[in-house]
Amino acid sequence: MHDEINNTKQPTLNSFLAKKTLFYSEINMNFMKIAWEIVRLYTRPKYVIHLVGTNGKGSTGRILATYLYKKGFKTLHYSSPHILKFNERIWIDGEDVSDEELNKNHQILQSILTDSLLMKLTYFEYTTLLSFLISHDVDYLVLEAGLGGEFDATNVIKNDLTIVTTIDYDHQEFLGHTIEEIATTKIVSADTAIILAKQVHDEVYDIAYKIAQQKQLQCFTLNDFKYSKQTYDIFPQTFLNQNLLSVLAVLEHLKIDINFDYFKDIQIKGRCQKIAPNITIDVGHNPLGASAIAKEFENKKVILIYNSLKDKNYKQVLTILKPIIKHLYVIHIDDLRALDIQDLETTLKELEISYSEFNSILPLHNQEILVFGSFKVVEEFLKIYEK
């Protein structure tokens, strides 16, 4: 089907995306919907699993996608953002998508969409369409919402199953200022069936049941399935074992046999990941993520390498992490949304957390190091660490 496109010389994917803004002040789905009506003619994933929620989407999606692939299903996992290379966003059959596959499908998009649409689509909208195109013949498309659910670019494609990971406060400027508002805009994106992960706010369950009833959808919790009612210690991280329960519920819902050996060697990049015996990186950036990481390092003291984007609740994050912090190093992040260093220093002084500027990893080689704060923090650290 894709071979029918007559490709002409177009800008490379990297040069095209370089001109796209990563951030926006308002959400307008019109152009994405118009573009999808064109792209849908060129792609037919057989089953779409949509992940919405605040925390745990990336790791839950990758554990599920890896298991499905190991069971012999052609599987694509779309997530965002990436840490070092764009290819990380589209994982297909066990590995990040190749440059060749990316550029081939980029050329198809350039050919079938009008210049006007190509100009108006945001970075995330365009890359979401790219992932849809690459998923044209997969058995399972595991799709992570970037922001919210109802108004997210990933929601233009009809989903067969929605996984609702833990919902908490985040992106209030787009999603609302109450848990009810945030949960509603996420869960209302469901089209067929809902599986709810364990929630920290009880009203999320009520909202999900209400939406399911209004839209005549199936709605399940972890207690509705045999395997997800139990506890496991397959992963060294507590929160990954928690996310595993949602995966087990999905597999049982899909009537796919469960072999626990298939989970044992799954690595989740940037999620409480040890890259050296004394260095852990984690892309968490909100209070829920901070609580999970604080639990992993309970009764320990770490050197924290940290920074934040200005729209994050960094004061609450640092308050949660304070019991495990021995000393904090502020790492520079090259981002327009980066928190003003003076604001961060004011908060660190208020919380009585000792800090200094991060320059080099060399003096820290004998200490327990945690890199936490966002994808950008981990990215900047890895650039220095891997030199």
Image (cartoon, rainbow, N blue to C red):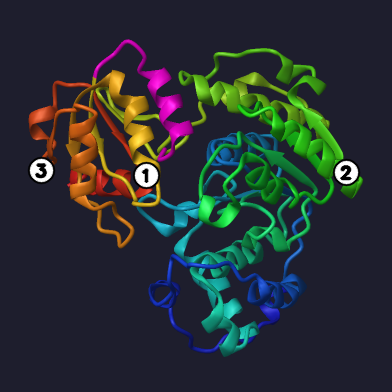
Give 360 or 2, whichever is nearer the viewer.
Answer: 360
Q: Does residue 281 appear in this view?
A: no
- Which residue is tagged 1? 374
Q: Residue at x 46, y 25 (%)?
A: 292
Residue farthest to the top? 299
| Residue that mark 2 sits on | 217
Q: Secondary structure at mark 3?
A: loop
Marks 3/1: CA–CA distance: 18 Å
Circle on res. 359: 3
x and y, in percent, of residue 74 in the image? 68, 48
| Picture layout, residue 118 above or below residue 367 | below
Amino acid carrying label 1: it is: Ser
Q: Is residue 378 left or right of residue 37?
A: left
Does the magenta run of residues contain 152? no
Residue 239: horizontal and vertical position, in percent? 52, 24
Quadrant location of residue 65? top right
Q: Where does the magenta region start and end?
A: 284-301
